[in-house]
Amino acid sequence: MPTGVLLVYIICLIVFASDSAKNNGRAYAEEKLISYDKSVSDKLLYELDAMKTAAEADALRIDDSSDGGKSMPFISELIKGGSAIEGYIAGSDGNAVDASGNKVDVSGEDWYTKAKEGTSGGKSTITEADLMDDEYVITIAAPSSDGNSLAAVRIPADFFKTVPSLSEFDGRTQYLFTDADGVVMCAVGGKGVLKGDNIFDGKILFAGSEPVATTKRNLLGDHSGIAYCSISGEERALVYRPLKLNGWKVMELATGNYIDTEVTNYFAPSKKVYIKIIIALIVFLAYILIMNFIIKMLYEQDQKRLKSKAETDLLTGVLNKISTEQTIQDYLDMVGEKEPGMFLLFDIDNFKKINDTRGHAFGDEVLKAVGTQLPTIYRTTDIVGRLGGDEFCVFLKDIPNENARLHMGEITYNFFRDLKVGEYAKYDVTASIGAAMFPKDGKNFSELYKSADKAVYTAKERGRDRLVFYGE
């Protein structure tokens, strides 16, 4: 029992350790996602900063250029490279020159208004995106040294597609570039969310006990984190990180399969160890149980042997006096008076004379012969015992009628007619036998013994070597 309790305790520890390892594996997978989301955010900020530098370089040329500040070589390079779609040198009145050298009036454009407001303090600015022909466009503007003009470059939010590596993780991770309201300005890789979707429009179902308002506040706030959700029934992990710029965020939508795979890979070495420990514990427990079973079996066999020895008469091999009385009485108590039986009591004739003339060793040989051969003429269920000295008894179960009674009496009498003892000079052993019927002549051992003993006395009076039924 203590071993079993110890094993259960150890198995519980292993289960807890297994859960802890799985949780650590999940934390490890989440940390990988968060770390990569940070690298994507840093790279995006670097790209935006490089474009802002290009705008600032062209803004410095406004006052110094021989063409009156109408050229914008750095912004033009961005347009040629595909990173930007428009570039302008604009004055304070909204009259501007585009990258092709065409004069345009941008005074009524929202982006110009935002750029002018953003550069009013003499610093460069990156404005919120505005929607142009289903495209989210970001404006990066830098003021001239006198503050009367600005250089502006218009960048599509789709340039974000070149920032993350789609080969990371399981290849199904989707990357999102969102504005301050959760609107997706650019989506790349994977499936689930499209450009123009709002992450709170119901397509993404967030898991957990937190209210939607709390989840929304967390995702649109100024801190990073991870939230579990589902899209079209598929489990996803949404990693989010703020750019600290216009409320923009970079998000990852990783698949649940990726998380599970990472947990499995992380847990695999520990799992092998746990399995080996559990197998060893099971083998050990099986060994303990087998050994306990063997010891118990040997103990029971030894107890039976000791009990048998305690109940057996050492000389004759039949039950001794105490066991005989107890066994017969237990049987009588069990059957009551429903099943008639027959009690036989034997006294070997002239046994004292046998001891005196042939010696006690021969007397013991006679007793041994009776004890060995007498049980063979009866059924195995019948009870045979030695009550002491030369006195034996037998209780025959289930003697239903007169014929059975006389038949068993004849078998018993014939036993002594055929019994001879001695290796060379055979000695004919006879006995005076008294028989009492149960329950007619006695309802317990003591009454049966007294009745049979009277019948033995009658047999001796009539000349010995005979069987007498009590009262007959």
Image (cartoon, helix red, strand yellow):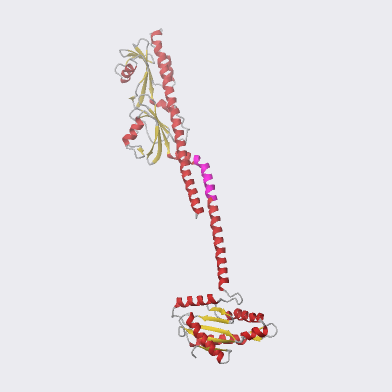
Residue 240 rendering spot, x and y as whole percentages: 39, 31
Q: Which residues are magenta?
A: 265-280
Pick whichever, 345 or 209, lies toward us: 345
Q: Is residue 78 above or below residue 439?
A: above
Quarter-of-image position of residue 459: bottom right
The structure residue drawn at horizontal position 46% and vertical position 41%, both measured from the top left corner, is 20
Left or right of 358, for residue 62: left
Q: Is residue 68 above or below residue 11?
A: above
Residue ranking furthest to the right: 424
The structure residue drawn at horizontal position 43% and vertical position 30%, both measured from the top left corner, is 37
Q: Is residue 82 visible?
A: no
Residue ranking furthest to the left: 108
Q: Residue 274 lies in magenta, yes or no?
A: yes
Residue ranking furthest to the bottom: 462
Pick whichever, 17 or 3, lies toward us: 3
Q: How many marks?
A: 0
The structure residue drawn at horizontal position 44% and vertical position 21%, both measured from the top left corner, is 81
Residue 183 rendering spot, x and y as whole percentages: 34, 30
Pick whichever, 107 or 164, lies toward us: 164
Residue 93 rendering spot, x and y as whole percentages: 30, 12
Pick whichever, 272 or 74, lies toward us: 272
Residue ranking furthest to the top: 66
